[in-house]
C-alpha cells in the first residue's frame, strides 16, 4: 500500500467531516483522561530508558574505562535508532493504523532495553542501544498523532499538553532508581528495570481504540463508524447523559491526492521547515543538556551521588510548567507560548553554565537547574501538542515523524558535539552551545509558525 492515496472520494470526505464533528461535540470526561493515561505511561517508559542511559554511561565510563567520545557514541547510537524508527513508523502508521504500530514499537523497545543489561562490551552495547532507540523513536510520532485525534479542539491543549508530564515522571523514576541502584548494585539492574513495561502492550490491546479519524481517511467507513460509536457509547456510560447534538458538520477535508510531497506544498512548506528546525535544535538543546548533565556535574567537581540527586530536583521541576503550559495553550495559543519558553530556556541554560563554572553550593546548583528545567519542559509540552495539529489526518503521522526524525539528528549530534567540545570550550562553553540551539529554534517559531489554538484537525 502507498501513502499516496489519490483523491479522497466525496463519500469518504463527508464521513471524515462527520467523524470530526462527532468527536468535537463530545464532552470532556474520563474517556479523554483514560487516553491520556494510556499514552502517557507509554511516554513515561520511553523517558525512563532515555534517563537510565544518561546515568548508566557515568558508571560505564568507570567500569569499561571509556573515553568521552565513546560515551557520546553510546548515547548517540540510541538516538540514531530513534531517527530510523521515527521515519519508518510515521509512514507505516498512516497506512496500517496508529494502534498496531504503537504496539510493535513498544515491543521492540522492551526487548532490546532488556538485552542492554547483558551487554558484555562497548560494541554490543552500541548495537543494542541502536535497536532500543528504533522502538523508542518509532513511538513518538504515533503517540503524538493518535492521542490528539481523540480530543476536541477546545480541550486539546490542556489534555494533550499534559502528555509530556509523563516524560518527566519516567525520567524522575530513572533518576531515583539510578540514585539507589547504580552506586550499590551496578548499572545492569537499572537496564532490567527499564524493560519492565513489556506488560503494558497487553493493556494497550485491551483499552486503546484505533483512531476513527484515521479509519475514515483510509476509506474504512464501516470501521470508522464502529469506532466512533464505541467511543460515543463509552462517553454516554461515563457521563450518564445523552450526547449534545452535532451542531455543524466540520469543513470537508481536502479531496486532492495526498502524498509525502504535500509536506512541501505551498500550504505546508513553511510549517514543515519551521518544525524541522524546531525539533532539530530543540532536541539538540535538550539532549546536549540532559544526556551529559550527570557527567558535566562530575566534571565540575561534584560526586556521582550528588549529581544524581541534583537531577532528581530538576525532573520534579519539569512537571509544573507542563501542566501550566497545557492550560495556557487553550487560552493564549501555541506559537507565542512556545517562543517564550524557548527564549527563556536559552537564557537559563547559559546562566546555568556560568553558575557551574564558579562551583557554587548545592542550593544555587539546584535553583538554577530547576529554572532551566522549568522552561525546557514547557517547550516540549507545547511542541508535542502543536506538531500534529499542523498536518491533515492522512499524513499526520508522516509529518510528525519527519519532524521527529529531524529531532533525532539533533539529539544524535548533541552528545557527540558536547563530548568533543568539552575539552575545547569547557563546561560554560557547552552550556552556551545549548543555549544557542534553543534561541535558533525560537527564531524560526516566531517567523514561520502559525497559530492552531482551538482549530479542528484537518481545518488548520
Image (cartoon, rainbow, N blue to C red):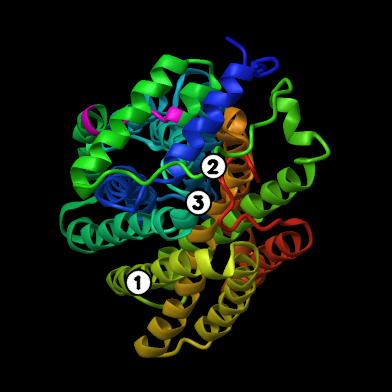
Residue 438 found in image quarter: bottom right
Between marks 2 and 3 in the image, the one whose residue lies nearer the viewer: 2
> Which residue is labeled 3 in the image?
153
Relative image position of residue 337 (x, y in whole percent): 59, 69
Res. 84 in view: no
Q: Nearer the viewer, residue 329 or 423?
A: 329
Magenta includes 341?
no
Residue 32 vertical position relative to residue 444 in the rendered view, above or below: above
Q: Nearer the viewer, residue 416 or 97?
A: 97
- Label 3 crowding class (10 Å Cα cut-off): few <14, some 14-19, many 20+? many
Question: Residue at the spot x=32%, y=50% of the render?
Answer: 48
Between marks 1 and 2 in the image, the one whose residue lies nearer the viewer: 2
Question: Residue at the spot x=47%, y=86% of the render?
Answer: 359
User: What stretch of residues is rendered in magenta?
Assistant: 206-212
Question: Residue at the spot x=47%, y=15% of the render?
Answer: 220
Residue at the extreme right = 266
Res. 255 in view: yes
Relative image position of residue 196 (x, y in whole percent): 20, 39
User: Which type of secondary structure does the marked residue at label 2 adopt?
Assistant: loop
> Which residue is labeled 1 in the image?
307
- Rounded to the nearest angstrom, the CA distance separating label 1 from label 2 is 56 Å
Residue 456 vertical position relative to residue 216 in the rendered view, above or below: below
Q: Is there CB contact under 8 Å for labels 1 and 3?
A: no
Q: Which disc, if any, is residue 359?
A: none
Residue 310 vertical position relative to residue 271 in the rendered view, above or below: below
User: Which type of secondary structure does the marked residue at label 3 adopt?
Assistant: helix
User: Which type of secondary structure does the marked residue at label 1 adopt?
Assistant: helix
- Label 2 crowding class (10 Å Cα cut-off): few <14, some 14-19, many 20+? few
> Which residue is labeled 2 in the image?
248
- Label 1 crowding class (10 Å Cα cut-off): few <14, some 14-19, many 20+? many
Residue 312 found in image quarter: bottom left
Q: Nearer the viewer, residue 134 or 303?
A: 134
Amino acid at each position: 500500500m502507498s501513502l499516496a492515496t489519490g483523491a479522497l472520494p466525496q463519500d469518504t470526505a463527508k464521513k471524515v467531516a462527520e467523524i470530526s464533528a462527532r468527536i468535537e461535540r463530545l464532552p470532556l470526561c474520563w474517556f479523554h483522561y483514560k487516553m491520556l493515561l494510556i499514552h502517557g505511561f507509554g511516554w513515561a517508559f520511553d523517558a525512563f530508558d532515555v534517563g537510565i542511559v544518561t546515568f548508566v554511561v557515568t558508571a560505564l565510563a568507570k567500569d569499561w574505562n571509556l573515553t568521552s567520545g565513546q560515551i557520546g557514541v553510546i548515547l548517540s547510537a540510541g538516538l540514531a535508532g530513534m531517527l530510523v524508527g521515527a521515519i519508518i513508523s510515521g509512514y507505516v502508521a498512516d497506512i496500517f493504523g496508529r494502534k498496531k504500530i504503537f504496539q510493535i514499537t513498544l515491543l521492540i523497545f522492551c526487548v532490546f532495553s532488556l538485552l542492554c543489561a547483558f551487554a558484555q562490551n562497548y560494541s554490543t552495547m552500541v548495537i543494542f542501544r541502536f535497536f532500543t532507540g528504533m522502538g523508542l523513536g518509532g513511538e513518538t510520532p504515533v503517540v503524538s498523532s493518535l492521542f490528539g485525534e481523540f480530543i476536541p479542539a477546545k480541550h486539546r491543549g490542556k489534555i494533550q499538553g499534559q502528555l509530556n508530564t509523563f516524560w518527566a515522571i519516567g525520567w524522575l523514576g530513572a533518576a531515583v532508581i539510578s540514585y539507589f541502584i547504580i552506586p550499590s548494585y551496578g548499572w545492569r539492574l537499572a537496564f532490567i528495570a527499564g524493560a519492565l513495561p513489556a506488560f503494558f502492550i497487553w493493556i494497550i490491546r485491551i483499552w486503546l481504540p484505533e483512531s476513527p479519524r484515521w479509519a475514515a481517511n483510509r476509506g474504512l467507513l464501516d470501521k470508522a463508524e464502529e469506532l466512533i460509536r464505541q467511543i460515543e457509547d463509552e462517553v454516554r456510560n461515563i457521563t450518564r447523559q445523552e450526547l449534545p447534538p452535532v451542531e455543524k458538520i466540520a469543513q470537508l477535508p481536502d479531496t486532492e491526492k495526498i502524498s509525502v510531497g504535500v509536506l512541501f506544498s505551498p500550504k505546508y512548506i513553511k510549517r514543515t521547515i519551521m518544525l524541522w528546525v524546531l525539533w532539530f535544535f530543540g532536541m539538540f538543546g535538550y539532549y546536549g543538556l540532559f544526556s551529559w548533565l550527570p557527567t558535566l556535574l562530575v566534571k565540575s567537581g561534584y560526586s556521582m551521588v550528588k549529581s544524581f540527586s541534583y537531577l532528581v530536583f530538576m525532573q520534579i521541576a519539569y512537571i509544573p510548567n507542563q501542566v501550566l503550559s497545557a492550560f495556557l495553550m487553550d487560552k493564549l495559543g501555541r506559537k507565542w507560548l512556545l517562543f517564550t519558553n524557548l527564549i527563556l530556556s536559552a537564557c537559563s541554560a547559559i546562566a546555568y553554565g556560568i553558575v557551574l563554572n564558579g562551583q557554587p553550593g548545592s542550593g544555587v546548583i539546584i535553583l538554577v537547574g530547576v529554572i532551566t528545567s522549568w522552561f525546557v519542559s514547557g517547550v516540549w509540552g507545547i511542541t508535542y501538542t502543536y506538531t500534529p495539529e499542523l498536518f491533515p489526518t492522512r499524513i499526520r503521522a508522516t509529518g510528525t515523524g519527519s519532524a521527529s526524525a529531524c529531532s533525532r539528528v539533533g539529539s544524535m549530534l548533541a552528545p557527540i558535539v558536547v563530548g568533543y567540545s568539552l575539552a575545547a570550550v569547557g563546561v560554560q562553553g557547552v552550556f552556551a552551545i545549548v543555549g544557542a540551539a534553543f534561541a535558533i529554534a525560537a527564531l524560526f517559531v516566531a517567523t514561520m509558525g502559525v497559530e492552531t489554538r482551538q482549530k479542528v484537525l484537518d481545518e488548520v
